[in-house]
């Protein structure tokens, strides 16, 4: 039997989401989806990290400037903390208040995040995407804003996977996050 005729195509590789597609997606999202999509696209969280966020994971004032951050544990139980922009925090605040100390999105799984995103894009007539595509968009934007693989890997919480543990000053991480692209008014967390 010819091996070419029995080959099964692999999964579609993730690709960064374009800013135009992201703007349409965010402008049409309800409050819950807006917060979930922003966590993927502006904080670069993996699906498992997103669903594990609890009310205590969203830190309102974590640095001397009083700017917000997200914190959690990675798959190995190691703590992580990353700065987020004010617009993402504004989207998360009502979700955090409603969580009453529990998970921000109870009942969601990494798979259901991608299904939810796929259905939203189909409903809007947008290209099909997975939740991981939002993380890849974040990685692309962080690399463009920082020009540094070390900063990008630190914000993506990938340094342990690469065998490189680099300390990056918090000010440099915050500065990079502040240089990420902004979108329209609605996607900035404002009604």
Image (cartoon, rainbow, N blue to C red):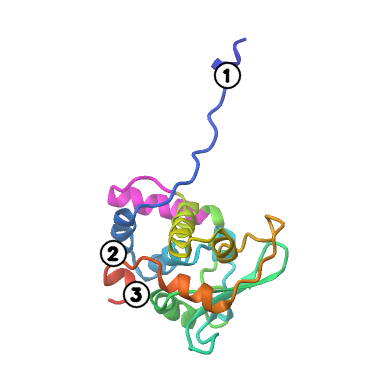
Asked if residue 127 lies in the magenta stretch, the reply is yes
**Disc with the residue nearer the chain's start (3 vs 1):** 1
Q: Which residue carries the number 1 mark? A: 6
The residue lying toward the viewer, choosing from 60 and 163, is 163
Look at 68% across and 56% down and name the residue there. 161
Q: Which residues are magenta?
A: 112-129
Q: Secondary structure at mark 2?
A: helix
Q: In which quarter of the view is residue 77 placed?
A: bottom right
Q: Which mark is residue 148?
A: none
Q: Which mark is residue 27?
A: 2
Residue that protrudes farthest toward the front in the picture:
147
Give the CA distance from mark 3 to mark 1: 48 Å
**Disc with the residue nearer the chain's start (2 vs 1):** 1
Label the magenta part by its dominant secondary structure.
Answer: helix
- Whole-percent x, y for residue 181 in the image: 36, 65
Give the CA distance from mark 3 to mark 2: 10 Å
């Amino acid at each position: 039997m010819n091996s070419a005729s029995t080959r099964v195509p692999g999964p579609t590789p993730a690709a960064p989401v374009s800013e135009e597609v992201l703007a349409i997606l965010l402008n049409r999202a309800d409050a819950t989806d807006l917060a979930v999509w922003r966590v993927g696209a502006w904080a670069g969280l993996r699906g498992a990290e997103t669903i594990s966020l609890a009310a205590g994971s969203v830190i309102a004032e974590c640095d001397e400037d009083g700017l917000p951050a997200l914190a959690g544990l990675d798959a190995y139980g190691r703590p992580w903390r990353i700065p987020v922009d004010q617009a993402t925090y504004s989207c998360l605040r009502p979700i955090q208040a409603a969580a009453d100390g529990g998970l921000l999105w109870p009942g969601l799984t990494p798979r259901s995040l991608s299904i939810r995103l796929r259905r939203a894009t189909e409903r809007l007539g947008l290209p099909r995407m997975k939740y991981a595509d939002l993380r890849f968009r974040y990685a692309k934007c962080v690399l463009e804003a920082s020009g540094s693989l070390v900063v990008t890997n630190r914000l993506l919480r990938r340094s342990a996977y690469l065998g490189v543990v680099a300390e990056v000053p918090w000010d440099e991480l915050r500065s990079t996050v502040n240089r990420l692209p902004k979108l329209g008014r609605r996607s900035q967390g404002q009604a």
